[in-house]
Image (cartoon, grey):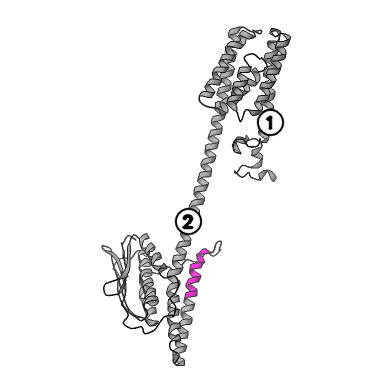
Amino acid sequence: MDEQVEHPLGVPRWQRLVLPSSMLHEQGGRRSVRDWVVDLVMFALGLGVGGIVLGDTWNDHSGAEAAFDIVLGAVAALSLWWRRKYPAAVGAFAGLASLVSALANGPAAMALFNAALRTSGRKLNALIALALLNAALFPLVYAGKDAYVAQLLIGILIAGVLVGWGLFVRAQRDLVRSLRERATRLQAEQRLKVEQAREAERLRIAREMHDVLAHRVSLLSLHAGALEFRPDASPEEIAEAAGVIRATAHAALEDLRDVVGVLRDGSEDGAPEPPQPTLDQVPALVEESRAAGMRISARIDTPDQPLPAALGRTAYRVVQEGLTNARKHAPGAAVDVAVSASAAEGMVVEVVSRRPVGVAVSASREPLPGAGTGLVGLAERVALAGGELRHGPDAAGDFILRATIPWTA
């Protein structure tokens, strides 16, 4: 099973045996097994082809010329070792050596193929011109056994085949690289989209948890504050307040379980959905706050036509945040809630916290943490629904929270 282990670039180990290092590493990287095999084959082919040319022209050499030819051809063959890093330089050296050395013609052919694979533009054109010059001049230096025209045509044909073959292999490699880069880019984009989706889900859940729990916790704080500042309350009143606190805490835990449930992965029964309140639940929300001692007047105009679900949820959250802020920052103040909706004018939700004349009951000695966070999240929620949220004190000192949401939400 070892052959299935993948390379960091995603290439299985068995494929690395047949791929060049240029497709596995950066330029100048360590040679792959395939590179070593190709190097040995090209070295052998270069000497083999050069040996054939040398044998064909051997009678045209003197003793000193033959020795010089062999030495220069061997050096040209050794230069192929650097053909990947310096393709143009190796091609030029081997091409020039092949003008006077028969043995160097083989390495020059290998170097020309390598240059077509790795060099472009003027350098490759210069090497092609050098190969054509070799085809024209070499038969004049070493006549050999064949006619000049035949040797010229064979030289031109070999040069054309080598260059065409090299360009074809190069095009294949460029295509593979582009496909790999595209796949890598798509994978990166996919990972980014997944991370963005996760982040959006985290923010949605965080906003949902704040909307749900801030309301419940503020109710708990209000009842606990009542017990704190009424030490002379009767046992019946204390028992009633404790019962309300217990029920509110139980409801908070239920809401928390529903919200956190969406974080569970792999549940066979399916993860529970977070609370999805609607406009129909606003009266119950108001009554719950009244039971906690708040003075609330509410006017809710329900439209005749069906209300979009997203619109109802947004309206509920606006009222919930308005009541929560009133309990936290203006305990004992009267609160007016007004909701109106129509397909023509959209929905308008307004929660007005009247300036308190006197503080009857303090919800807590210390303000709850996270002040202002709910309004930020609420503004984002209303904006996503295509609406507008405004909040702040008016000239009379009343704090107004007003959301205008189009019907298309």
Name the quadrant of the C terminus: bottom left
Q: Which residues are magenta?
A: 252-263
Q: Element at badge 2?
A: helix
Disc 1 residue type (three-letter)? Val
Q: Residue at x 50, y 49 (%)?
A: 190
Q: Residue 243 location, x and y as percent?
A: 47, 84
Residue behind mark 1: 37
| Position above or below: 341 against 243 | above
Residue behind mark 2: 197
Residue 3, quarter of the rendered image:
top right
Question: In screen coordinates, is 406 left or right of 165?
Answer: left
Quick one: label 2, few (<14), some, or many (20+) residues within 10 Å? few
Residue placed most toward the observer, 129 or 15: 129
Disc 2 residue type (three-letter)? Ala
Q: Residue 277 location, x and y as percent?
A: 40, 69
Q: Residue at x 48, y 68 (%)?
A: 259
Q: CA distance from mark 1 to mark 2?
A: 48 Å
Q: Residue 122 location, x and y as percent?
A: 51, 23
Q: Element at badge 1?
A: helix
Residue 85, quarter of the rendered image:
top right
Quick one: label 1, few (<14), some, or many (20+) residues within 10 Å? few
Question: In screen coordinates, is 43 left or right of 293?
Answer: right
Residue placed most toward the observer, 325 or 5: 325
Question: In screen coordinates, is 364 left or right of 110?
Answer: left
